[in-house]
Amino acid sequence: MKKKQNIKSASVKVKEVSVLQEPEVQYIAGNTAFPYRIIDTARDGISKGSFMNFINKFDYTLREVASVLNLSERTLQRYENSDKLSKDASERALHFKRLYTKGETVFGSIDAFNEWMKTSNLLFNNKKPMSYLDTSFGFEMLEDELGRIEHGIFA
């Protein structure tokens, strides 16, 4: 007769950390090898405060931030910094983070990329690249263009 083996479970104390402040988020947001982690993070939601701390580095107005998140300006104002954004808004926030991570790599600095995002460009019908951040297709178009710039393929 076999003896039953008792297995003790260990409890681990987990510190809650805002997703955009985690050291690995830059790596995760910029690496497509971890799509499940990004999806889980978007589903769980990220806090408004974390995203605002990140996006405030780039001199976006509240209206522009609301547009990126696909929220009204007033709805965004109602969120407390500790409130989690919706799944859709969190997904857009992570997409924004991934875009800026790639842009910093391609342009060599966040400031140079931010200037490119805010300058009208013939390639984008004389519109600012940032004006396309209100749709997922806009994010894709900008990421594709960053890929072309990175590889020296200009329009």
Image: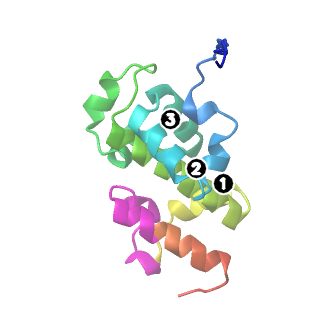
Q: Are marks 3 and 2 in contact (CB under 8 Å)?
A: no
Q: Residue flagged by tag 2: what amino acid is it?
A: Ala
How crowded pointer 2 is (Cα within 10 Å; few <14, some 14-19, many 20+) is rated as many
Identify which residue, 37 or 52, lies in the foreground.
Answer: 37
Dot label at residue 51: 3
Q: Going by the image, does 138 lie left or right of 155?
A: left
Q: Which residue is mark 1?
A: 111
Q: Position of residue 113 (x, y in %)?
A: 62, 60
Residue at point 58%, 35% (across, down): 20
Q: Are marks 3 and 1 in contact (CB under 8 Å)?
A: no
Q: Quadrant of residue 76?
A: top left
In the image, the segment drawn in magenta is 122-141
Q: Which residue is mark 2?
A: 29
Q: Quadrant of residue 134?
A: bottom left
Q: CA distance from mark 3 to mark 2?
A: 13 Å
Mark 2 element type: helix
How crowded pointer 1 is (Cα within 10 Å; few <14, some 14-19, many 20+) is rated as some
Q: Position of residue 91 (x, y in %)?
A: 41, 45
Q: Going by the image, does 22 lie left or right of 19?
A: right
Placement of 41 over or under 144, stated as above or below: above
Mark 1 element type: helix
